[in-house]
Amino acid sequence: MNEDGTRRFEYGENVVLRYITRFDSRAGMSWPYRVVEDQDDLVALYIPKGAQYARWGRPPAPGAPRGPLELDGWRRDVLRLMFPGKGHSIWLFWERDDDGNREFTSYYVNMEEPFRRTPIGFDTNDHTLDIVVRPDLSWRWKDEEQFAGLIEAGRYTPEFGEFVRNEGRSAVELIEGRKPPFGAGWEDWEPPADWECPSLVDGWADLPARVWERRDWAYR
């Protein structure tokens, strides 16, 4: 264990990944996961359909502030691949039918803060721009207009905007080159049958955040 209480997590361990709010550095949307791998170059986390996660409540009226965090059921099986020091993660999605049959439906490149370890899991935050990748590795950008709007409004700095786009471009090179993790066998991965559904651990919202050291450069 490190001096700050962080450590490598064991296979199958229940952890919590939290999005840390940009301005008041507290836990926002948060998800429970089971650890699939925790290595020097890769952290792989799994959340099944039905797991209870914390999301922001819907605003009471158009233009009103969002509501407080509330629990909801996650809607699909997801394997999240995270890479130490990288500003994106790669997700794999599976859908289940009423009989429990499972089908791989897409990859998803999520631009985000490089993750930080905590005693209960990992802290990061979303960077709006994403890439949707079909099983045949055709792809498209997602939320480009929203991302550009945040830069125009001064919420993101122009330099940070280019940083995020470069993260996306690096993922596109992997997609178009058919390089791992795309088409590398993760789409055939299945969780052990004896894994219980992960849950948000006690005190998950109160644990002090591990803040991204570049947020003052990135956010306004």
Image (tube, rainbow, N blue to C red):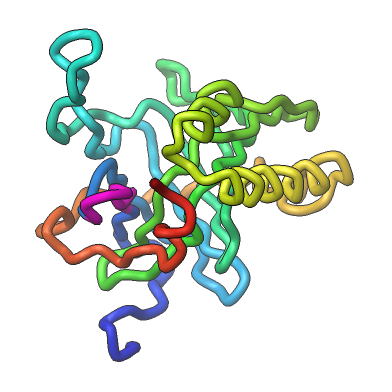
Q: Is residue 20 magenta?
A: yes
Q: Position of residue 141 (x, y in %)?
A: 67, 27
Q: Position of residue 40 (x, y in %)?
A: 58, 76
Residue at image location 51% in from the left, 24% down from the top: 146
Q: Is residue 85 magenta?
A: no
Q: Position of residue 124 (x, y in %)?
A: 40, 55
Q: Position of residue 110 (x, y in %)?
A: 55, 41
* Figure label count: 0
Residue at image location 66% in from the left, 46% down from the top: 162
Q: Residue furthest top?
A: 62
Please tell me whether residue 81 is drawn above or below residue 11 in the rendered image.
above
In this picture, residue 103 sits left or right of residue 14: right
Q: Residue furthest right?
A: 177
Q: Which residues are magenta?
A: 18-25
Main SS, magenta region, reads loop
Residue at image location 21% in from the left, 19% down from the top: 58
